[in-house]
Image (cartoon, rainbow, N blue to C red):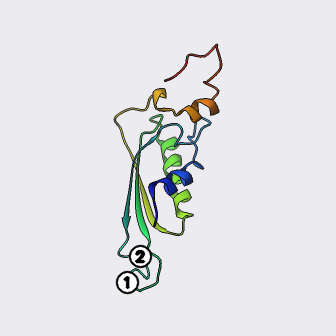
Amino acid sequence: MLTEPDILQALRDCYDPVLPCNIVDLGLIRSITISLDPDAPGATIPGVPQKYLVEIAIIPTQTEEAANSQLSAQIVNRLAGLETISRSTVTLLDSPTWTPSNITSAGRKTLGLDGNPHLVQIR
């Protein structure tokens, strides 16, 4: 059975086009929807593993169309590598807007925002 933690783990391989941090730790993921794909090849054959449709909603860090297209393609390509996923879609949300306060503690560490007295801490 495919779970949200499985998808989040895979998405840690996807990086923002501008910020050197993965999209999970940047806090870009807003929702993940997983549903069985009734049209997947072999879906009605007993013993054939189930395939899933995955919908990801993200808040991009910027509005540049080329960067957002790159980000969406990166996510779709990464999820295509999971054999239990038959198809995935990415929705870019306009609101709420992304802010640095969305970054996880692991992301702040990756970006060098924690433990540096010369930087404003983002919480």
Dot 2: few (<14), some (14–19), or many (≥20) neighbours within 10 Å? Answer: some
Q: Amino acid at mark 2?
A: Ala
Q: Measuring from the top left, give residue 81's x and y in whole percent.
A: 57, 64
State left or right for residue 81 relative to residue 29: right
Residue found at x 54% / y 69%: 83
Identify the image quadrant of residue 35.
bottom left
CA separation, marks 1 and 2? 9 Å
Q: Which mark is residue 7?
A: none
Residue 56, above or below 121: below
Residue found at x 58% / y 35%: 106
Residue 17, above or below 105: below
State left or right for residue 115 relative to residue 23: right
Q: Amino acid at mark 1?
A: Thr
Residue found at x 61% / y 24%: 114
Disc 1, SS: loop
What residue sits right under mark 1 in the picture? Answer: 44
Disc 2, SS: loop
Residue 17, above or below 82: above
Q: Nearer the viewer, residue 66 or 120?
A: 120
Q: Which mark is residue 40?
A: 2
